[in-house]
Amino acid sequence: MYNVPSHNELQKIVELIRSIIFPDFFPATTQPEPLLKAMMLIQLSTVIDDAEEAKRITKEFCQSMPRIRALIEMDVDAAMHNDPAVASRAEVVYCYPLIRVMLHYRPAHCLYQLGVPLIPRMLTEMAHSETGIDIHPAAQIGDHFCIDHGTGVVIGETAIIGSHVVLYQGVTLGAKNFQYDEEGKPMNVPRHPIIEDNVTIYSNASVLGRIRIGHDTIVGGNIWLTHDVPPHSRVVQRPCDGIPPHNNVDVLNDK
């Protein structure tokens, strides 16, 4: 019989992580660090047969908590910097779906990098169900990341996102097509965009394929983008009249 991690216990682990990262907002009734270590080891043991390996990964994950905390604190900073509707840091921590999803994604990404099966994907899918934001745990996301509103955002497995990137609702960082092996199975190769630093992508834009969006670029809303964009660009819709299909995007360079 296949051992399955407990959804309820994983949710408790996320809540413990939240209390470690935001002790002023979510004070723990007990010392959260020892409890996190014990609970994580139990869940890792359901997917890792080697007990010593499970202990090693648990130790490395717990040692990564200061880095995870720093990154999520920077995500809070990014939300405060990019949304004039923010009234306080408490409002971001308690109310913004960005923080809920990053509390799942950043630990999940750490576990994914440590080679843990299943659990990272379970963690991000839990956040997907709660927020409508779908981030694969393998995606690489830099510091000061901001998603405003959030519903419908999709970030694929091989996406790479730099620092100080802002996404709005409905943005897809997806694959344009798939490569297949000789047996007809889809190949797991890089197929999602690379988004460089200081990029803003507005609502319902679809950025597809292994393309590169240069730093300090703005991608307008409702854009279908399948080619590289140089740094310091603005990608906008052309007027629809008289424009042939699939050729209705202008790339304007600010340099």
Image: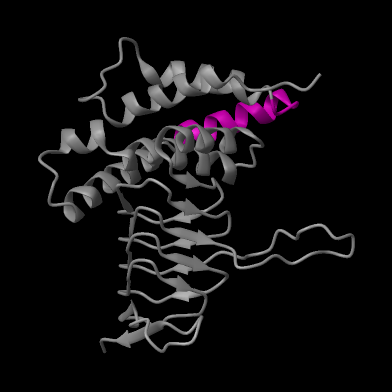
Q: Is residue 174 above or below residue 100?
A: below
Start and end of the magenta stretch? 47-63
x, y (%) of residue 251? 36, 84
x, y (%) of residue 213? 43, 74
What residue do we see at 12% from left, 38% from top?
88
What residue do we see at 16% from left, 38% from top?
89
Residue 70 sits in which quadrant? top left
Q: Most extreme residue toward the left, as rendered?
A: 87
Residue 185 lies left or right of residue 223; in this view the side is right
x, y (%) of residue 191? 61, 65
Residue 46 sits in which quadrant? top right
Q: Is residue 231 above or below residue 205?
A: below
Q: Is residue 171 above or below residue 37?
A: below
60 in the magenta segment: yes
Name the foreground residue: 126 vs 3: 126
Name the foreground residue: 155 vs 22: 155
- Classified by dominant secondary structure, the portion drawn in magenta counts as helix
